[in-house]
Image (cartoon, grey):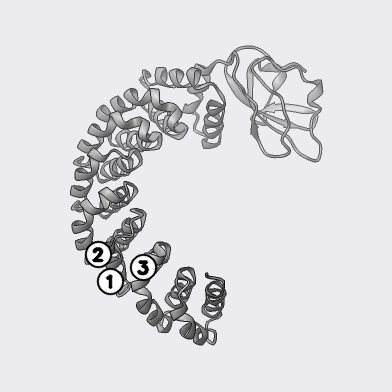
Amino acid sequence: MTLGGKTNPIILNAHQENFFIGGHEPLAKIDRHVVDIYAPVSNPPDLAKLSCPPAVSCKLFGSRPRLLAQAGNIDVDALVDELTDLDEDVRDRVLEALRKIDPAVAIPALVRGLNSNDEGLRQNIVYTLGQLGSIAKDAVPSIIKEFCHGNVYMRAIAAEALGNIGPEARDAVHALINALRDPDEYVRQSAARALGEIGEASAEPALIKALEDSEFMVQDAALLSLGMMGDKAAFAALPRIMALLKDPDWRIRRSAVVALTEMGTTAKPVVSMLTEALKDPHNGVRIVAIGALANIGEAARSAIPELIAMLKDEDWSIRAAAANALGIMGSRLAVAALEMSLEDENVIVSEAAYEALEKIKHTP
């Protein structure tokens, strides 16, 4: 049986001796390129008997569907059209195919697809470009256009795509900063996230301002983005983050702690804030603060007394987290307290104490 022809790519299901499209139509009646083959391990087809077209690399990968389409004379525009398929599985395989094709061929085809009047297709194309990451950098101007003129859903998808492309999407920073004032909170959230992933310092003031947004999801995204930008953003945002550590919403307080952690700084003001967060009334905040101090290590030794005291906390998860942190920090000051924790009624805590003692024992 011969597979051939230069028309639309399809998905082929291979089952024993018979080949079917979508489980129904025999391949013999179809003249298309093949994107995927499904083949059972128990009775795989003899691929040696197949004559594949130049654009297709026929290989068998057990029972898992794998991409077969490689670069060649495959009709990439037709492949892009398949993004309108209602089946998410099909769209995922089209995306995998596009990843295998030379970006110099695939990206222009996707950009051409943005000229379509089919809004659903354009949204799927923008999403796909984002999933392709930095290799889609040449599509940034087209994505910005969709971002600036699309509906709410398109704006959110486009912002996410620009973030996924990363620093190569720096030309979008101005538009994304403006989007932090978008009337839709999902668009503002996506824009804040994208600015962090792009990492341009010029966005820092706008992200700090976004910490005052009325929606938690936007504040959270802005906090995490500032964290991704490192020490410089850390110190610029510290006054506002300090205020958020006292926010009534525990989720905001936790996000503020996470932001401090992501900033990667060991400066005393940050250690002081994280140590204060150990007293937070919500365990979700306290556990994140414990982990942050443990990751800072030597520079956070001033928090060791508070961590030792937490070995007696009424919540076992806090006790276990504190024991783990003390082990990571290699604190010999904690040995006596950890030895007492070996008798903790909760086995997870006692195991954490034992592991911590072992780490301290091997600390230089």
- 4, above or below 322, in the image: above
Query: As shown in the figure, which amino acid type bears the numbered disc 1?
Result: Glu
User: Quick check: can you spot residue 204?
Assistant: yes
Residue 139 point in image, percent of width and height: 38, 24
Q: Position of residue 102 (x, y in %)?
A: 53, 21
Q: Are marks 2 and 3 in contact (CB under 8 Å)?
A: no
In the image, is 345 to the left or to the right of 191?
A: right
Q: Which mark is residue 276?
A: 1
Mark found first going from the N terminus, 2 or 1? 2
Q: Is residue 330 left or right of residue 313?
A: right
- Circles 2 and 1: CB atoms closer than 8 Å: yes
Mark 1 and mark 3: Cα distance apart in space: 12 Å
Q: Residues within 10 Å of mark 3 (few under 14, many from 20)?
A: many
* Residue under the point 81% across and 21% down: 49
Determine whether the residue tagged by mark 2 lies in a helix, strand or loop. loop
Query: In the image, what residue type sits under mark 2?
Result: Leu
Residue 289 in sight here: no
Question: For mark 3, what is the residue?
Answer: 300
Query: On screen, 50 above or below 336?
Result: above
Q: Earlier in the sequence, mark 2 or mark 3?
A: 2
Residue at the disc numbered 2: 245
Q: Nearer the viewer, mark 1 or mark 3?
A: 3
